Amino acid sequence: MPNESTSAPSAAALALQIRAFGAPTEVAEVLEIAVPSPGPGEVRVRMEFAPVNPADLNVLEGKYGTLPALPAVAGIEGVGRVVSSGGETDEALVGKRVLLPHGFGAWRQFGNAKAAELVVVPETIPAHQAAMLRINPATALCLLRHFTHLQPGEWIVQNAANSGVGRGVIQIARACGWKTVNIVRRPGLKEELEGIGADVVLEEGDGLAKRITEAAGGSNIRLALNAVGGECALSQAKALASGGIHVTYGAMSLQPLRMPNGLLIFKDLTFRGFWVSQWYRAAGEKDVATLFSKLFEWASKGVLHTPVEAVYKLSQAKEAIAHAMRANRGGKILFEG
């Protein structure tokens, strides 16, 4: 590898930086920031695509589980290409497409990252799809694999089925031979979700617990995935079989879980929580490698696919964030480097 490709001088890059928490469209600032030369063990990565996730909006608002020290570059996940090395790294990384690590701040043109924290992405996966693998599909796979051992043909029930995680759950469940009852909060989504593998799509509303049970043909449902809370989460719990597991990973309704004592006493339900950021911190290298191996396999084959509604430049940050905050979107909003 020629010397000029393994070192890079300090430079300036556009980045979406936050210096205070507040209304997302107000606190997002596109600035030119200094990027030093990559040090030993570091590489310089140029961002290709980075999504605007609900968690990103929560960070901008100052309402996420962990918040960066300010000022900070926003953007939890994305994909980029290694353009140079600071030395003491595998030179074969230069030129590779990689997932951007937690803490990188993906909403930037380029920046430096520790080479050991990068995950190389197969070139068979479209870059815009690779940009969205670290959070939502990873959450979906962990939700389906880490709480119980599902047998082929078993049913699960989930709400927020049209979300990024919900779509991942549908696609992974279909690939693994599991069946899904999918709850949504608005009409008009049935055909779309059935098109990606949903077995049943139900709208929230009266008699939901009974409709869930009937949709599964009376089969025992041992796993419920909840990203909404409130009455919808209660309906899921009522539809679970004795000994079932109810996992909460979001709270879109902003309503808490309210469970009657009888569900615990007479059905012996287990209630758990899941946060993929915490999973990454606790997981070993082998667990992370196994997770991405499966996600990459499915993404390469088109089994996992997330729709994209619009792509923006970093200079259009306020427009992109406002678009991401709209209700009834049909796909993700991405930044392009």
Image (spheres, rainbow, N blue to C red):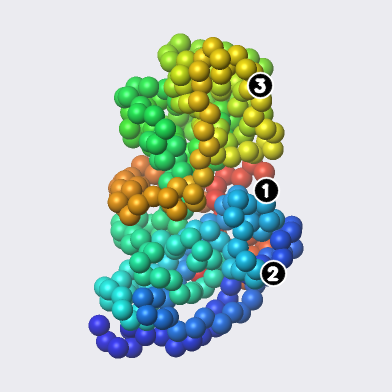
The amino acid at mark 1 is: Arg
45 lies above or below 228? below
Q: Where is residue 80 in the image (x, y as percent from the top left)?
A: 42, 67
Q: Is mark 1 on a helix, strand or loop?
A: loop
Q: Mark 2 or mark 1: which is in front? A: 2
Q: Mark 3 or mark 1: which is in front? A: 3
The answer to whether residue 300 is visible is no
Q: Position of residue 298 (x, y in %)?
A: 33, 45
The amino acid at mark 2 is: Arg
Whole-number angstrom distance, CA of label 2 to CA of label 1: 24 Å
User: Which residue corresponds to the image point at 30% horizontal and 48% vertical from the top-left?
Assistant: 290
Whole-number angstrom distance, CA of label 3 to CA of label 2: 42 Å
Q: Residues within 10 Å of mark 1 (few under 14, many from 20)?
A: few
Q: Name the residue under label 3.
A: 205
The image quadrant where one finds the N terminus is bottom left
81 lies above or below 130? below
Q: Mark 2 points at which residue?
A: 19
